[in-house]
Structure formats: C-alpha cells, structure tokens
Image (cartoon, rainbow, N blue to C red):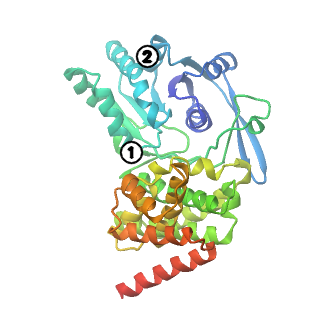
Amino acid sequence: MKKAVMYGGGNIGRGFIGMLLSQSGYEVTFIDVAEPVVKALQEKRNYPVRYVSSEGYQDVWVENVTAVNGNDAEAASDAIAGCDIMATAVGARILKFIVPNIVAGLRKRWAMGKGSLNIIICENLNDANKILEGMLKAELAAEEQERFDRTVGLVEASIGRMVPVQTEQMKDGEPMRVCVEQYGFLPVDKAAFKGDIPQIKNMVPYAPFDFYIKRKLYVHNMGHATCAYLGNLLGLEYIYEAIAVPEIRILVQNAMQESEMALCKRYGTPMMDLQEHITDLLYRFTNAALQDTCQRVGGDPARKLSLEDRLIGASLLAIEEGITPAYIALGAAAGLRRYLKENGGIQSMDAAKAALLEVSQLTDEHKLAKLILHYYEMMLDGSSLLKLVSETEKQKHESMAAVV
C-alpha cells in the first residue's frame, strides 16, 4: 500500500487532508506532539469525521491510519523517509519546529536512494512554499540544497473547507471525531510538483496558482473576516447569526464582489466562475451546525489587517485595478475597531490612525486609510448598520461617477 505522512493531526490534518489521503488509497501516518491523539490513532487505526449542515449530519470513518509522536525524531524521520507523499497542517507558527524532522527524513530518503518527495503545504500563510524552503535549506549543506531542488516539491495548497474549533458537543462522545462542512476541494500548485502528480481525491492541480491563493485570501477569508467583525459590531456570537442580518449579508456580498472584479481584471478569469464561488460561500456561512464564532473567525485582527493580508491586501488590489473598495474598507474599519478593543480598549480617531499605521503601514493620508477612518469615525459616532450600508453605496456611486 502507498504511504503518506500527514504532519499535523489537528482539525485540518484529520478533518480534511489526512482524510483525502486515506480515501485515495494511502496508509496515512500522522505526526503530532499531542500524545492522546497519537495514542488513539495508534490503537484504533481509524477515526470519525462528521459532515454537518443545518439539515443534519453524516458520519464517515477514516481508515488505515496510524501516528508517531513528533518528539520522537527517529520515528518521525523514518516515516518521512519511507513515504510516497507528505502534507503539513501544523499552523504557520509551528512550521519552524518541524523542520529538523523533515531534514532528517530527507537525508534518510537520499541515503536509501528513494525518489522525489512532494510536500503539500496546507498552512494559512502567504508564500508558504518559499518560507518553508528557506527554513529547510538553512539546515542543508550546499550539495544537499542542490539535491533538494531536484527531488523535493513544495506544493502550496488552498484550504477552503471550514473546520471550526471542536466542542465537546461536536465530539459527541468520540474524542477523535472532527466535524466539518461537506465542501472538500483541494486546489494545489500544479507547477510545483516534482515527477508525476499523484492522484488524490478532490485535489485540483492548477497553474498559475497565485490566482487560487488570492481567491482564497481576498474573497473567502476577507468575506469571512468582514462577516465576523460586523457581527462583533452588533454583539453577535456566531457567523451564521451575523450573515442572517440582511445588512451584513449585503455588505459581505458586495465586499467579496469588489475582490472578485479585481481578481478577474488581474488574472483574466471569467466573472461567472467567481460569482458562483461567492454564492456558494454565502450559503456555507449560514451553516449553523458548524457553530463557528465571530470571535474565532475574527481572531488576530493585527494579522488580518496587515499590508498583504485579506482586508488591506484585497483593498489595495482593488485600487490597483481601478476599483474603489468601499465595502472591503468598511470590513477593515470594523476590524480596526476590534483591534483597538483588544489592545487597550481606547476607541478614538487618534488611536485608530496610530493603529492603522502600526498594523497596516498606511498613513492617514493614504486613499485607503481615509476611507477606513471615515467608516471608523461613523462607528465611533454610533451610526447604525443601515446608515453604514447607505454610506458604502454613496461612496461607490461617487467613485463610479468620478470615473465617468
């Protein structure tokens, strides 16, 4: 049987990538440092995944799995040395800690005369392939780096499946159960593979892959964050509650459409394809069974407001393509409000200007900063969501009139 290594046995590792690898005929070895997860996988060699929706649920058992503890460097590197395909889903901040085991595994592979190894990188991180490559090569000698370039494919992936924090209620008496939505496509960078592209269920190789990375970040992630921050504005707990508010749905949909138009201009893709994607996302946001919270989805607002991330990055792309990001900027303003609330609690125009410069690198004279601060000031003054919708429509109308 073909062998796969899934580095990371968390929600994405078990609830998405490891599952696809198992369903594609691989024996999957998870590498993780959570001993209860490792022990359960070793003893049972299977685990349940539950597809949840507002209409009910369906349980699927993932078979032919086992695990090793990442703290056992010998066992972890042996698994990597002997596998046919590998994937990572450990979280961006953890990548550096798994590098020694990967390097050791590669050295063992090379000593064994094994063929190429493709590593599918499933991390929520811009340029994850370049970042991981830099970390790995820093541990390799010059001749090893040359061999690395010939034999190791670092394949970026775009993770679209929504997997929330697992509650005890979701586990339903089975600690290893992961509840997920039904959506299960895995776009990957077609050009990054070394050798033959493996046949993996629902994997979609695509080039140029930068389009998929931007689509995920600037449409899905941006829309999700905007929904969360507007939900925070109204004191709502769950994403499905926020998207059910008509004004929030309008704002989120229009924000995603601004990104859609910018992406279509930049990459020359059909608008119909992205519009169908937006319609699907809006429906998926209504999934009450996921119990996804505005607090989780909007977490780490400093990162989400950074220069190239979902809100500011999408806005700047729109501006570059001649589109005024009136709706995306409103989401950014709501995110700025949450950032200030979580970092000292001071809500003022001076604090907002300073924060925008700190986290987004935008001076208050920047066109985008002016728009974000305008909306933030309205929020500061207690403007209703209906008034904010009206103001975004006004900003959009004025920008279109200026072009004409």
Under circle 2, the secondary element is helix
Q: What quarter of the picture does the N terminus occupy? A: top right
Which amino acid does the dot numbered 2 rest on?
A: Ser
Count of numbered marks: 2
Residue underneath mark 2:
77
Considering only order in the chain, which callout, 1 or 2, is on the residue closer to the N terminus? 2
As drawn, the residue found furthest toward the left would be: 142
Q: Nearer the viewer, residue 400 or 356?
A: 356
Residue at horizontal 22%, vertical 26%?
A: 146
Instruction: Please tell me the numbered disc located at residue 190.
Output: 1
Residue at horizontal 78%, vertical 38%?
A: 169
Q: Is residue 284 left or right of residue 174?
A: left
Which amino acid does the dot numbered 1 rest on?
A: Lys
Q: Position of residue 180 (x, y in %)?
A: 66, 43
Q: Position of residue 257 (x, y in %)?
A: 50, 69
Q: Position of residue 165 (x, y in %)?
A: 65, 40
